[in-house]
Image: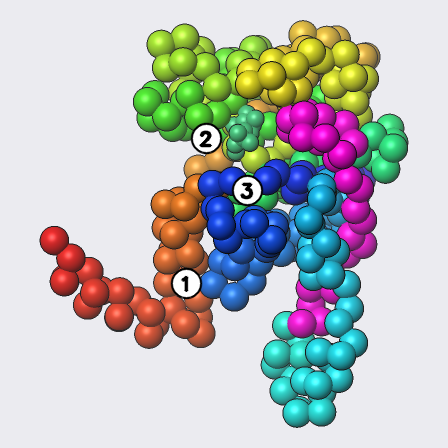
Amino acid sequence: MTIQKAVIPAAGLGTRFLPATKATPKEMLPIVDKPAIQYVVEEAVRAGLDDVLLITGRSKRSLADHFDAAPELEQALEAKGDTERLAKVRASSELGHVHFVRQGQPKGLGHAVLQAKHHVGHEPFAVLLGDDLIDERDELLSTMLTLQERTGGSVIALLEVPPSQISLYGCAAVEPLAGQGSGGDADQVRVTALVEKPDADEAPSNLAIIGRYVLNAAVFDVLERTEPGRGGEIQLTDALATLADLPTEQGGGVYGVVFRGRRYDTGDRLDYLKAVVQIASDRPDLGPDFRSWLTEYATTLD
Ligand code: G1P
């Protein structure tokens, strides 16, 4: 059975970007000229997941508008003969099937994912967090989908981070994946334990969970039983820790793919700025001019 559904939690308040996010969802902040959320939806669709469920909240209506057709705008561009911009406007409404459900109360990432239970049903599905952008030239989600199909369990994406940064992330203890043999892929592991945002001296490793998951639907029953954890919120990491201890027949087993490609964090202002600069520098249309300006500008900095 091929995995078709992607869930994208987008109900956060975006307080780190106030006042920009007072009336605009943080997922709509542009990375160059495209809202952050569109990069994530495009990544899901590229991996074959064309059924996308956004978990939203109040004041997120512009997300629905963005993935819908915009007849007046399209007619105006058509009348002007601006086919290039018309194609860009249409592209965002022609990306897969985008559905919406509201979280209601902000009770944490685990609670957000639980809102997808009815839509997802019993099949495995992917979760993509909008704060993490994965460079489209680097492979991650498709590797995770393949590993999920092979193991039947749940798969998380891991990134090696400096020990001083591990307290910002969920952290995984891992062991080599049985059956990999010497020809196996050292970047695919079995997860033995998970802890959400541990203190640096208590972290079981320097492997941080980044925002891509492929989950067995057993996660929903586990989430329903998961008590609020770190920060008083229902944590997806805690549900995964339970799944790691469950037998395969009950939908258990958690595996990891260690990602070594390019990832852009857009979760706080400084990282967001870095992401915009990196992505703009790589753009074929703007990149050459932007890079030469940036190089010159850099020489004026202390
Ligand atoms: C969430 C997860 C955390 C994970 C992180 C990745 O935290 O709870 O385990 O490492 O996403 O971006 P948040 O960044 O929402 O606080």
Q: Quadrant of residue 292?
A: bottom left
Q: Crowding at label 2, few (<14), some or many (≥20) Cα neighbours within 10 Å?
A: some
Mark 1 to mark 3 CA distance (whole Å): 23 Å
- Evaluate whether residue 43 shows in this view: no
Asked whether 137 falls inside the magenta stretch, the response is no
- Image quarter for ligand 1: top right
Of residues 13 and 147, the one drawn nearer to the viewer in this rendering: 13
Q: In the image, is residue 280 above or below residue 214?
A: below
In front: label 2 or label 3 = 3
The image shows residue 257 at horizontal and vertical percentages of 55, 30
Mark number displayed over residue 227? none
Asked whether 109 falls inside the magenta stretch, the response is yes
Count every numbered label the image shows and give the total: 3
Q: In the image, is residue 159 above or below residue 234?
A: below
In front: label 2 or label 1 = 1
Q: Which residue is drawn at 47% across and 41% down?
A: 16
The numbered mark, 2 or 1, whose residue comes first in the sequence reads 2
The image shows residue 135 at horizontal and vertical percentages of 50, 50
Q: In the image, is residue 200 above or below residue 45?
A: above
Mark 2 to mark 3 CA distance (whole Å): 24 Å
Residue that carries the numbered disc 3 in the rendered image: 14
The numbered mark, 2 or 3, whose residue comes first in the sequence reads 3
Residue closest to the far bottom? 80
Q: Residue at x 77, y 63 (%)?
A: 68
